[in-house]
Image (cartoon, grey):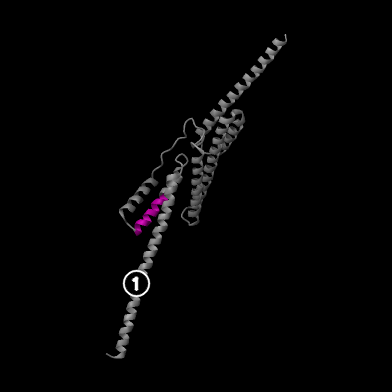
């Protein structure tokens, strides 16, 4: 076997090994890219799922519900292209169906001036609203949502946040009334009523405003009644004093 032939065999072997190494590296790179893509998609899914599950039912609009469901549907579809398992296909079908379904309307609790039962629930809701607004800003920055739609949803989120702030104020007013009486707090209720009126663009706050107005009217009657009784009591004292002096 000539040296030239041997050299060619060696060169062929080196080229073959280099080709195999290149193919293996390409496979590994594609596998790594696939895994990174899956991680990114699942991270977005976890975030959107958390928002959808945690958003206060009374405050979530059909636009917000549909956006989150469509976002989840699109990402599950992308996952199916990488991993077409039965579970992934079921999740895609689930959110595809939910995106086309309007959420059940939740009415304001009858007899309650507030949306939430306590301040802890309200504070958690405010955190979710802030997280949703940040989510919208991020997907807008990535070009994953129409700019006008994003701006509309952000504006609605800010109004919802302001509404929850009023809820917290109302809870504080209720505590003050219980501790110190209606005279001290009636102006606070009126302030909350005025703030909600300014937020009631689509009459969605009518029931809550009715509950506050009803309570305000009752407080005003109680205050007037207490004032009348106080005047009568003072008059009785004056009359008793006159009789005693006589």
Name the residue tied to disc 1.
Answer: 23
Q: Is residue 200 visible?
A: no
Residue 77, how many percent across, how many down?
37, 54
Q: Nearer the viewer, residue 88 or 170?
A: 170
Tell me, yes or no, whether the highlighted magenta stretch contains residue 210.
no
Determine whether, in the image, residue 114 is placed left or right of residue 72: right
49 and 156: which is toward the camera: 49
Quarter of the rendering containing residue 166: top right
Quadrant holding the N terminus:
bottom left
Question: Which region is colored magenta?
Answer: 70-82
Q: Secondary structure at mark 1?
A: helix
Res. 17 visible in picture: yes
* Viewer-proximal residue among 44 and 150: 44
Q: Residue at x 70, y 10 (%)?
A: 244
**Crowdedness of circle 1 by 10 Å Cα count: few (<14), some, many (20+)?**
few
Q: In the figure, 158 relative to 107: above or below?
A: below
Residue 77 within the segment the image draws in magenta: yes
């Amino acid at each position: 076997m000539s040296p030239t032939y041997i050299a060619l065999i060696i060169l062929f072997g080196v080229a073959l090994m280099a080709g195999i190494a290149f193919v293996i590296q390409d496979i590994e790179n594609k596998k790594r890219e696939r895994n990174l893509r899956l991680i990114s998609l699942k991270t977005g899914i976890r975030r959107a799922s958390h928002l959808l599950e945690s958003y206060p039912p009374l405050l979530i609009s059909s636009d917000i519900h549909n956006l989150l469901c469509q976002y989840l549907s699109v990402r599950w579809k992308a996952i199916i292209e990488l991993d077409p398992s039965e579970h992934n296909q079921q999740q895609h079908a689930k959110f595809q169906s939910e995106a086309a379904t309007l959420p059940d309307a939740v009415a304001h609790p009858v007899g309650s001036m507030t949306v939430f039962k306590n301040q802890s629930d309200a504070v958690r809701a405010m955190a979710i609203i802030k997280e949703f607004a940040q989510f919208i800003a991020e997907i807008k920055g990535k070009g994953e949502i129409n700019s006008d739609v994003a701006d509309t949803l952000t504006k609605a989120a800010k109004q919802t946040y302001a509404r929850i702030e009023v809820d917290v104020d109302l809870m504080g007013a209720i505590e003050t009334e219980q501790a110190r009486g209606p005279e001290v707090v009636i102006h606070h209720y009126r302030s909350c009523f005025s703030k909600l009126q300014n937020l009631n663009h689509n009459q969605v706050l009518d029931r809550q405003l009715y509950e506050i107005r009803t309570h305000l009217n009752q407080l005003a009657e109680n205050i007037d009644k207490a004032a009348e009784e106080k005047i009568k009591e003072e008059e009785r004292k004056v009359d008793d004093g006159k009789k005693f002096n006589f």
